[in-house]
Amino acid sequence: MKKFTLEEFLDLLKKYNVEEIEGVKIEGDLEIELEGSSIDLSAIAPLYSMLSEFGNFLYHANMALGYLQRLSAALGIPTPFAAQPQLAPAAPAAPEAAPEVEEIKLPTELVRAKFEPYKEEYPNKIEEVVLGATKADGGSREYTITLGGERSLAFYTFDAPQPHLPAIAIDVFDRRPMLAKAVRTHYEDVLDNPAEWAKKCVKKFGADLVTLHLISTDPLLDDTPASEAVKVLEDVLQAVKCPIIVGGSGNKEKDPEVLEKAAEVAEGERIMLASATLDMDWERIANAAKKYGHVVLSWTQMDINNQKTLNRYLLKRVEVPRNSIVMDPTTAALGYGLDYAFTNMERIRISGLKGDTDLNFPISSGTTNAWGAREAWMVDSPIEEDTPWGPRELRGPIWEIITGLTLSLAGVDLFMMMHPIAVAVLKEVFNTLGGNVKESVADPGEWIFMEV
Amino acid sequence: MKVKSPLEVYNYLPRTNCGECGFDTCMSFAAHIIDRSVTPLDCKPLVEEAEKDPKAKKKLEELLELTAPEIAEVVIGVGENAVKIGGEEVLHRHELTFFNPTGFFYDVWDTMDDKTLEERCDRVVSYKKFYVGNFLTLDGFAVRCTSGDPKRYREVVKKVASYGKPMILVALDPECMEAALEEVADQRPLMYAATEGNWKEFLKMALEYKVPVTLRAKDLDVLKSMAVTFKQAGVKDIVLDPVTEPLGEGLKGTFERVIQLRRTAIAGQDKDVAYPIMITPIAAWLIEGDEVTKSYWEAVIASMFIVKYGDVMIFRSLDQHVVMPTITLRFNIYTDPRTPVQVEPGLRAINDPGPDDPVFITTNFALTYYTVESDLTSGGIKGWLLVLNTEGLGVEVSVAGGQFTASKVKELIEETKIEEKVNHKYLVIPGLAARLQGAIEDETGWKVLVGPMDSGRIKGWLEKNWPPKEKE
């Protein structure tokens, strides 16, 4: 059998003056298996373009093949194609090609379909908790912050309006804390003056609230007596007019005393006491909150059942009003357990919305924890094979942002943060998802073509 | 998947308990089909029967249909680098788990000069970030056609293909797309994108070249219409792009569209939109501002949709302040919450230590353990590492929660017989466990040294503190 090349085949076509083929419609593209690998791809091109002249584009490979076979059979020459053995019955097979054309006919119009979004409605609502009290309510704050009130998952405003966007509190300490360099830079001038520090947070960095951590009360640090420590709280209440959160040192024995004293001196201001935990005298802290009209932060270690237990103690045993409890289910940093923190909070939020009245309280996050991640503060990776980590000044804030952003999607209502850029970016995110940012990009598809 | 209980699956199985699948009983195998650790195709007798008997084949197909994931699974690329996207079952990870991590693709374009192109491709291919015992890497390239020239596009696509990573072909012009497909269709690239303007040509190409295709439309009626049209024409591998708008109301709208698509697919059982979702954080580069602003916002958009249903993404920035947080978040969100991330407690010898080398202790939380272990190993530190069973909790939490205690440390010291391996009794504890120093000394009789807060600093710490000044 004579083998011949495509070029020869094309020459043959020319020789027979094949310019027009009647009764054969060709659609789609050409996909031919060639026998042997000696034929280079460029030889396909002229064949392809020739066939295109006959009938738009080819669709099914076997159609193209069938066509060539019929053509070559008519011309009485064998083809180099794989399907060649079927050459003989090719002619009777020809009529079958016709219905196939019908079958692969492509739609010329879209099949119109309507998208019907699934609607989700929850039976319950997250409690609304007001922080701060204005003159009208016996305090001296210029404004109050309301947390909670959701009837849907965070920012699902297409399910139900979200009455309050998450608020951001910036941390202030009553003695120099250990801070990552990128954070410390922004507070260098106020580290020894909590009142000035608080002012800077509000005036310069846009904090909605300020959290004052009385860490000097820690017996292992300065062991400042409670009555002494709360003087700083009085200074801060004077210096800024935003709602205030007060934290202890984390010492289980000392915190109840410190927070009780804080509750006393801040009477009427509706501060939040941070925090009551299961392993300290939560009763004393909760009673102080109740007595002086404050809010209590119910803090557990990433355990939804413990969170239920502690909330129930506060509600049932101390009878803290439902509008005076906020939960901190614990924040772990991006890369350091964020998945646990996220899922724990998401479960708590969904349970609350579905009707668990032990869990339908606003959620708070100690987002500053993000700075514990080495990716946030270390100069570079300690792992040699790692791609270099790049400037840490840029890594740190984004670590805090992404930690906060992730948890905001789980339902966090209150963020305690530190880096001013992280605060600004998260606010922008909340305002965007909350529908307060009107501007938009004209053509969101421009990136497809942009030459940079 | 449609079935929820192993019993429903069990009825389709041979029920012989032959054990060929590696499980003792067919019921146990059925339970693993439900949790998606195996598929019906892992039952050899079932598959063999189906090959012989058309009736059995029909039954197997039924079972495959019943156990197919809620969201279609789409494969981009071929071979060991191929990326699987979609295949999700639930809206919230605690309901089961999320399965296929978001695919990360980085853009290159065909009007780039060759040198820049190569540099960028090299950066993508060589990217590595150590995390929990492994290196995280990037998935592939999105090759954009900015020249409008089919020949040039084809050339560049060919070049990028030589890196062996999966590709997304970004070209709205059918001619350019086809030129690229002629070159690399066998690499199974994802086409981006069919729109209301070009869908006919893209549908043809999807069928002809048998490659997955992205459908792009902001209007969800149009998007669904395209999906239905493509499916009816025989296209199975579909990805939906509801258009990522990077800013303001546009971004809010994007958030809504993405959630509605996924929720309607899973909770609303609308199979016509049950496909993987494409997000393009690269659109952040259309906003006003400097590079840091744009790249930060790119990380923000990406993170938002790593948490919420983005299955594949096209990125611009290769800067670490974008890649590191997003790649870490992806790992976190797609970690299976059903399996605790723990390692075996016990004793590990690091870098072939001797009797004079230090003894460290850490927890069996995988992240903590691998961090410490890799810091010691890559720092060339010889030492003994005690791994305490803290039930998979980290140092800080387990010290506070009572899983890291002096008496448990004592038990571990006894169990591992570390005293026989070293000629000293100094134990280095994590800085975050400092408060246990006294208790451990009392309980074990060992001298306890408080190490640094972060194991990355052990090397420097040892230079100052090891060997201990006053040896017993």
Image (cartoon, rainbow, N blue to C red):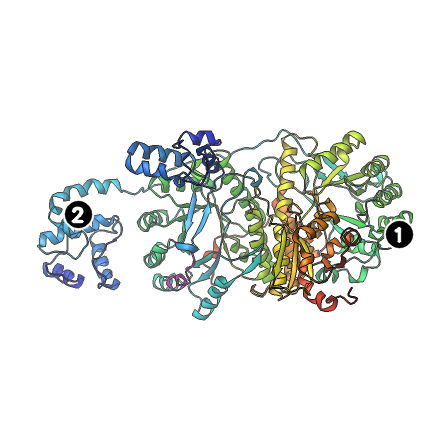
Left or right, residue B282 beside residue A167: left
Mark 1 and mark 2 in contact (Cβ < 8 Å)? no
- Which image quadrant: the N terminus of chain A? bottom left
Q: Is residue A180 magenta?
A: no
In the rendered image, residue B119, in percent from the top left (x then y), is placed at 48, 68
- Highlighted range, magenta: B157-168
Question: The disc labelled 2 sits on which kind of residue?
Answer: Val
Bin the neighbour count of mark 2 within 10 Å (Cα to Cα): few under 14, some 14-19, many 20 and up.
Answer: few
Q: Secondary structure at mark 2?
A: loop
Residue A389 shows up from this direction = no
Q: Nearer the viewer, residue A359 or A100?
A: A359
Number of the front mark, 2 or 1: 1
In the rendered image, residue A66, in percent from the top left (x then y), is placed at 18, 49
Q: Secondary structure at mark 1?
A: loop
Determine the residue located farthest toward the left in the rendered image: A76
Q: Nearer the viewer, residue B188 or B355?
A: B355
Left or right, residue B316 beside residue A309: left
Q: Chain of mark 2?
A: A
In the rendered image, residue B440, in percent from the top left (x then y), is placed at 76, 52
Question: The disc labelled 1 sits on which kind of residue?
Answer: Thr
Please determine if labels 2 and 1 lie on a single subunit.
yes
The residue singled out by tag 2 in the image is A24
Q: Nearer the viewer, residue B238 or B36?
A: B36
Instruction: Give the residue drawn at x 50%, y 57%.
Output: B138
Left or right, residue B320 beside residue B390: left
Q: Chain of mark 1?
A: A
The residue singled out by tag 1 in the image is A224
